[in-house]
Amino acid sequence: MNVISNNKWIGQRTIRPDGADKVTGRAAFAADTNMPGMIWGKVLRSPHPHARIKSIDTSKAEALPGVKAVVSARDIVDFPVDKSVMLGIQDMRWMCRNVMAREKALFPGHPIAAVAATTEAIAAHACELIEVDYEVLPWSIEIDDAIRPDAPILHDFLTFEGKPSNIAGKLEVKKGDIEQGFREAEVVIERSFSTRPVHQGYIEPHACLVSVGADNKTTIWSSSQGQFMVRAMTAYLTGIPQSDIRAIPAEIGGGFGGKTIVYLEPLATLLAKKSGRPVKMVMTREEVMRATGPTSGSKSTVKIGAKKDGTIVAAQGTFWLQAGALPGSPIRGAVGCSFSPYDIPHVLAVGFDVLSNRSKVAAYRAPGAPIGAYAVECVLDELAEALRMDPLELRLKNAAKQGTKAAFGPVFPRIGYIETLEAAKAHPHYTAPLGKWQGRGVASGFWFNAGGESSAQVNITEDGNVVVTTGHPDVGGSRAAIANICAELLGIDYKRVSVLIGDTATIGFSNLTGGSRVLFASAIVVTQSTDKIITTLRERAAKIWEIDPEAVKWENGAAHPASPNAGQFEPLTLAELAAKAPVMGGPIGAGVQLNTEGAEGGFGTHICDVEVDPELGIVRVIRYTAVQDVGRAIHPGYVEGQIQGGVAQGIGWALNEEYIYNKSGKVDNPGFLDYRMPVCSDLPMLDTVMVEVPNPKHPQGVKGVGEVPLVPVMAAVANAIHNALGKRFYSLPMSPPVVLEGMEDPEIRQAAE
Amino acid sequence: MSELRYLAPHTLDEAIAAFAAAGSAARILAGGTDLLVQMRSGAVKPGLIVDIKKIAEMTAIEQTADGGFRIGAAVPGAVLSEHPRFGRAWPGVLEAVNLIGSTQVQGRASAGGNLCNGSPAGDSVPALVAAGAMVTLQGPNGRREIKVEDIPAGPGRTNLLPGEILVSFTLPPRPKGASDAYLRMIPRTEMDIAVVGVGVNLTIKDGVCTAARVGLGAVAPTVLLVEAAAKALIGSKLDDAALKAAASACSAACRPIDDKRGTIVYRTKVAGVLLKRTVAIAAARAREN
Ligand SMILES: Cc1cc2nc3c(=O)[nH]c(=O)nc-3n(C[C@H](O)[C@H](O)[C@H](O)COP(=O)(O)OP(=O)(O)OC[C@H]3O[C@@H](n4cnc5c(N)ncnc54)[C@H](O)[C@@H]3O)c2cc1C
C-alpha cells in the first residue's frame, strides 16, 4: 500500500458533517427522541454499599395509578457465575449482575428494580413504594481495606490462591530475567503511588428510548459508543434475538469509553415489553456519578534500575486496580503499556484486579495506561535526577524503536516515539525561562490502539454525489475524516460526500467506537469500497468508449483515457456516469466488511509548566505542549481536538478530580459542582505538535490518536510540581489542601528560591 | 403527586399576603438559581412559588439622597454590573456578586437569593457584611431594617420571620479614601463554591486606616463579621504587623468543618492568607479614591 501524497482533502480542516446540527441544536441526542404513547422508566437503586437482597415486594408500586410495568432481576436473563460468556471485554456474568442486582446489592446506586409509568414523577414515586428487605453486610471501598485478610468478601465464588478473595484476577507481562536485570543496575529507584477513581465526565447522561412490538420486534434509540454492542448486550440480557432488535445510534454527547457498556437499554426493553408502550429512560447526573463509569483507583509500586550512563536495564511494576463491585479492571493497559515506550531488556509488570463496594468501572481513554504511566514516568523523572541527566535525554537513550520487542509481546514496526522526544526537545517551550514557584515536567505515554471489525457501504446517488455509511458512532470527528478520505479518492469536492452512521439493521457489524480504532478501521473499509466503485466507474467508461477498462484512469472526479494510445475521448465525470447508470449496468455502490489488522500503537511526549500558589496550595497549569506521533492527520483539527481533550482530562485527574466518600460508604460529591473537572478558564491554550510517522500498514497511514494524549498527563503535571517545589507528591489528586500541607516541608522554600 | 402553584404578583402586599397565607410550603423565587436546582434534586418540594421579579422595588437600583445605594433584592448580577456608578463606589460588593456562577447564571442570580439561601459560602454575603449593608424586610407585620449579618441563622436557615420577604439592601454613602474588595478561594477558577471567602471594606486617610470591616465566609455555620480583624487594621498603616494580626484574627474566628469542599486545617490557614490579599486590593483601590 502506498501513502497518498499531494492531497487535496486529506489533511484539510474541513467543516464536520455534524457541525451545523450540533451548533444549531438540531442534532438528536438520545434524550431528544420521543414517541406517541411513550412512558417513563426509573430505577430504584440500593442505598447500601453491600447488602443481601432477601426479598423485593413490588405490589404497592404496581398498584399505583399510572404505573405500567415493574421489572427486577427475575426478568433479566441470568448468566450463572461458573461459566464465562464474553462480549468484547465484558463478561455477561457480571453484566447481568450490574444492570440489576441479583443476589446482592454491591454498591450504593446498584439497580434493584425499575418501574415504567405515565410520568417520570409517578415512576419515581413508585420506586419509593417498592419494599426491599436488605440484610446489610460489611463493606469496603479502598484497595487496602478490600485486600485485608479479614475484608468482607464480595463474591464467595471468586478465589485467589485458593481462598475466597476480593482479588478477582492477576495479569503478568514479562521479558528477560528481572532479578538478573536489577543485579546489573547501578542506580535503582523504587517508589509507590496511588490514584483515585475518576469519571469520564461526558456531558450527556445515559439515555434511551425503546419500543417493543407485539411480535417482539424491538427498536432502541440510545447514546452509546456502539449500536452493535447495545444490540448484543440487550439481546443477551433480555433473551430477544439480535435479529429482532434494531439499535439506532443517537448523536453522542461524549463517552470517552464510558459508553461502551449498557445500563438502561435492557431495563427499558423489558419495561417496554411488559407494558406494551415505548419506554424512555434518562439518568440524572447523580445516577451517572453513582452507578456508571468511572475508571479505577489504583496503587502501584514501580522500580527501575539503570547503569550510570543512563541505560535502563530492569523495570518492575506492580499495579493494583479497582474493578468496582464486579471483576474487570483495566490491568491489561497498566501492565502492557507502562514500560512500552522503552527498550528494556528485563521487565516484569504484574496487575491485580481488586473488587470493592463501588460502581463497576468502565473503559476510560486508554484504560489502565495512564495509571501505569503516572508511576513509571514519575520514577523515570527521579532516575534522571539521580543520574543528573536531562529527562528527555534519558528517555531518548532508552527509547523503543523499530525492532524493539515490547514486553507485552509484539516487535515494533516503524514507530515515531523518538520523533516525539526530539520534537519536544527542540520545541521552544522546553527551554523557555521559568519564574518563581514555576516548574516544568515531561512525560511520555503509549497506547496499544486497535483494529477489529468494520463495515462500510459507499453509494453513488443518481445525481452523482456520494453517501457513505459506516457503523461506528462518531465521538471525535470521524465522519469529517471519512469524508476527507472519500473525496480524496474520488477526486471530488468534499461537500459532495455525506457520511452517516448506520443502525444495526442498515449496516454490517461494526465493533465499538473504542481503542482509538474508528478512523483506522473505517478508513480501510471505506477505501476498499471506494476503490471498488472506481473500478466500476472505469469499467462503465470503458464500455461507453468501447475500450479496455485497463485503458481508463480515474482522476479529478472523472474517467479519462489512460494514455493517448487509448483513444481521444472527453472525460466522463462522476455525475455523467451516475446519470447513465440505469442503462449501463445499474446502481453504483460497494460495501466492504473486514476484520481490520495492522493498528499500530501510538506514542506521545508532553511538556507541562505549572505555577504553584505556595500560600493556597493551588497548582495552575500555565503552559502545555503535547507532542504525538499521529500517523497521518487526516483531519488535523480533530486530531488536535483529541489531543487537547485528553490533556484537559488528565489535568483534571492530576489536580482535582476524585470521588469523596462519606462514612456510610456513599459518594458524597455526585455532581459537577463538587466533582471538579477542569473548566475552560482553568487551562491555558493546550499546544499540540503532530508528528507524522505514517502507519505502514494503513492505506492513509492512520494510527489511533484519541487515547494516547491522556496517558502522559498526570506524570507530566506531577514532575512539573516537583520541579517547582523540589518536593514530590506520590498520590493523586494534587489538590490544594494536599499541596498546602506538603508546603510545610522545610526544604521547599529553599528549593524554589 | 402534589400540586405546584406559581404566582407573579406586581405588588409587595400581594406577594406577602400570598406568601404568608401559604405558610411553610411556599417559596420566594428571585433568580431561581438555587431554588430550581433544589427542586429538581428533590431537596425542596414547594406547594407555592411566589415570583418577586415583577415587583418594581425588587428589581430597582437607586442612589439614595445621602449618596448611598438601595438595591432591590432580586436585581440580577448582570444588571448590577451595568449600573454606571455602583461598581465605582462598591467594587468589592460588585465583584462578589459577579463571581456567582457563570454568565448565564449572572443573568438571573440575585444578592437577595444568595443571602436568603442561607449558605455560609454565598459569595456576596461577606462583601455585603463588610460593606455594612442594611436590609429591609417586609412581612405581614410591616417593615423592619436589620444588618445583613443578622440574616443568616445557620446553613440553609435565616432569621426571616414567617411570611417575611427581603425587599432591598441599603449601602451607606462612601467617604473619601474608602473602597472594598472580595476574594474567594476555589480549587478551580470558576463554577465552584467558596472554600473560604473574605470581604474587606476600609477607609484610608493620610496613609492610615481609619475604618475597616471584615466579612468571612465558608468557615463557620454562618458568614462572620470579624471585628478583631478590623480592630487590628484600624489605626495602622496596613503594615506587615497589622496584616499579620488581622490574618490571625481571621484564622482564630474560623469554626469550620471538614467536608468535601475543604478541611478544617486548610480553611483556617487560607482565611488568614486571603485576608492579607483582600486588604491589599481594597487598600490599593482606596488610595485612588
Ligand atoms: C451553576 C451555578 C453556579 C453557582 N455559583 C455560585 C457561586 O459561585 N457563588 C455563590 O455564592 N452561589 C453560586 N450559586 C448559587 C446561586 O446562584 C446563588 O446563591 C444566587 O445568588 C441565588 O440567587 P437567586 O436570585 O437565583 O435565588 P433563588 O434561587 O431565587 O432563591 C434562593 C433562596 O432564597 C429565597 N429567596 C430569594 N429571594 C428572596 C427574598 N427576596 N426574600 C426571601 N427569600 C428569598 C428563595 O426562596 C430560595 O430559598 C450557583 C448556582 C448555580 C446554578
Image: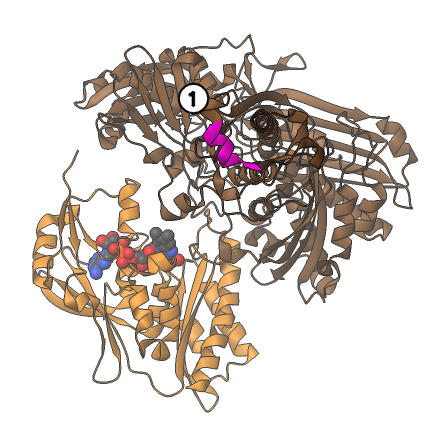
Chain colours: A brown, B orange
**Image: A42 above or below A444:** above
**Foreground of the two, A21 or A70:** A21
Q: Secondary structure at mark 1?
A: helix
- The residue labelled by disc 1 is A99
Which quadrant would residue A544 be assigned to in this image? top right
**Which residue is outermost to the bottom?**
B206
Image x and y of residue A97, in percent? 46, 18
Please give the name of the residue rendered at 65% of the width and 24% of the height, measured from the top-left corner: A548
Dominant secondary structure of the magenta stretch? Answer: helix
Chain of the residue under the numbered disc 1 shown in the image: A
Image x and y of residue B177, in percent? 40, 86
Which quadrant would residue A341 be assigned to in this image? top right
Which quadrant would residue A249 be assigned to in this image? top left
Please give the name of the residue rendered at 9% of the width and 60% of the height, measured from the top-left corner: B140
**Foreground of the two, B44 or A15:** A15
Q: In the rendered image, is residue B196 in sight?
A: yes
Image x and y of residue A327, in percent? 56, 21
Verify whether residue A264 appears in magenta: no
Question: For the magenta stretch, what is the residue range?
Answer: A570-580
| Crowd rating for badge 1 (residues with CA inside 10 Å; few <14, some 14–19, many 20+) | many
Q: In the rendered image, is residue A137 in sight?
A: no
| Quarter of the figure with the N terminus of chain A | top right
